[in-house]
Amino acid sequence: MSTSDTTNGPSRSDWLRRYRWLLELGLFSCLSLFWLFLWAAQGKIYLGDDLSFHLNRVQGLYQQLISGHWGLGHIATTTFQGWGYPINLFYPAYTLLPMAVLQVWVGGVHAYAMFLFLITLLTLYTTRFVGQRVLGSYYQGLLLAVLYSFSQYRVLDFFVRGALAEGIVFAFLPLVFYGAYSIAIGDVHQWYWLTLGMALIGLTHVVSLILASVLVLLTLGLFFLKRTGLKQRLGALFLAVVTTGLLDLTFLAPLMEQLHHMKGLGIMQFQLASSAVQPWPFLVNSAVNQMESNQINLGWLMLMLLLLTLGVCWKFNGVERYLVGLAVVFVWLATTWFPWSLFQGVLGTIQFPWRFLAIASFLIALVGTRALVLVLPRNTRRVRRILLAAMVALGMILNVASFINYFQNPYNNAITPESYHTVATGVASTDYVQPVSLPAMPALKAHSIVVMNPTKGQATLRQTSRQVGADSFTYRLWSRRARRLKLPHLAYPGYQVTVNGHRQPLRQNRRAILLANVKQGSNTIRVAYVATPLQRVSAWLSALAWVALLGWIGWKTWRRLRQ
């Protein structure tokens, strides 16, 4: 070997090691662009089942920002038809804030595309990190990230279902698994990854928090494969649960406060045994990558990976075999073969058991990565690169095929920059309205106190103006006589009614409609939502918990780098 060869070899290796982060950023950025390109290249958004609902949520945050208020806001004053829908009290909006900020700069359609790019980039990073830690090599982490991020159910969630919040959750599920897995196998010092993953899911999508809890519970079955250190593992689990509760207290405590004062919600209920997928159609739809919301499936790639894994899992160790079983269980949970009628009361809020396919996709990608590496004819660097390139190409080809399949469906609608504002403000959702209030909704959406208080004969009431502010509405009206009026708003804890500068006790009728007493002549009525004491206290506790946890993690990282 020549001297130059000896010199160049280590220097190249050192360069790759030093700048691997830059190469990784370039690779992940390209993958994110390829994943998104066809869906965003035409400058429009494809309107999935629930996307308009989520765009209304983002538009509300955007209105808060451009009006000079950096808080999330509690009620929708300019979106959801503008009657004061308390969306942020029931549906966490924290992880949508980056898209609202992007919308300030580039407008709604482009902000959505950029946000999906960032979410995909984040998903690739978190998955690579977890794969490297669990599977023991950087290469397998990369392979896992590609397989998981290009999974069919993830494409269905974003573009067919329009489930933006659930799509975001894909980025956090690997962290939840890694934290639970670490605690279960005895690596208790990694407990905080479970906390971070669960907390971020809790601040994104409450139903996914329930699904992730099932993942944690079943992953902890690994406890029984190791009998030592039980006390330490249980202590780490308890610490993770308590810390997660503190981090999410800013949303969970106000949510409990609202639910305590309500008599039911208008959310549609489904029988899980009926909304689960039939096994045979599920397999067929997976094999051909169907792109319909009534044909939810796992996708050809995940199906083939699962079959490959089942074929070679006899080579796995005990922990890996348990994870294979876990992947099969989560696929089973999506189907009617699971006895869902027994769990309707406990898990009925998830509505659709096929939501477990997000977790199944991750687990299949995890054990599938292990299976792919095991079946390599030679485990050389060149063969590994060929395998990674093949999986990237396959993921891109399947993504193109899914787009073509979706694009041929005449049902699909698209949102252009011209139509964005209309779509992002006019959704008529009643999920968080009490059933007793539903008959009053048409009148509420008229935004008129006169409509709420019809009179026969000569008009005795006249509304002269209506102004909308952050978490507030101001009405000016004239009344022929002093009276008690129904306002076009529903009562929720935190609402305040002020008439002519004087705050009135919060009154409501049997349909939970706010009431106000006015005097004869001109009146100014202000209806505002003000954070309750519980909301303020819980927000501060959560903020302190986040600062403490992130500060502790930062200190640990700094100390490790120094050593």
Image (cartoon, helix red, strand yellow):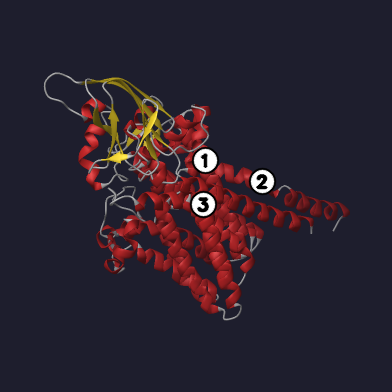
Q: Evaluate whether residue 302 shows in this view.
A: no
Residue 48: mark in rendering: none
The residue drawn where x is 38% and y is 28% is: 421
Circle 2: element type: helix
Location of residue 458 by image quarter: top left
Residue 117: mark in rendering: 1
Q: Nearer the viewer, residue 27 or 224?
A: 224
| Amino acid at pointer 3 | Leu
Rendered location of residue 385, percent (x, y): 61, 55
| Amino acid at pointer 2 | Leu
Residue with the mark numbered 3: 200
Distance in Å between CA atoms under marks 2 and 1: 18 Å
Distance in Å between CA atoms under marks 2 and 3: 28 Å
Distance in Å between CA atoms under marks 3 and 1: 19 Å
Q: Nearer the viewer, mark 2 or mark 1?
A: 1
The relative height of residue 413 versus residue 231 in the rendered view (above or below) is above
Residue contact between numbered discs 2 and 3, judged by CB atoms under 8 Å:
no
The residue drawn where x is 36% and y is 66% is: 332
Rendered location of residue 189, percent (x, y): 64, 66
Residue with the mark numbered 2: 23
| Amino acid at pointer 1 | Phe
Q: Nearer the viewer, residue 389 or 87?
A: 87
- Image-based side of 17 in relation to 225, left or right: right
Circle 1: element type: helix
Q: Nearer the viewer, mark 2 or mark 3?
A: 3
Location of residue 179 by image quarter: bottom right
> Of callouts 3 and 1, which one flags the residue occurring earlier in the amino acid sequence?
1
Rendered location of residue 556, percent (x, y): 70, 57
> Of callouts 2 and 1, which one flags the residue occurring earlier in the amino acid sequence?
2
Label 3 neighbourhood size at 10 Å, few (<14), some (14-19), many (20+)?
many
The residue drawn where x is 29% and y is 44% is: 433
The relative height of residue 466 versus residue 171 in the rendered view (above or below) is above
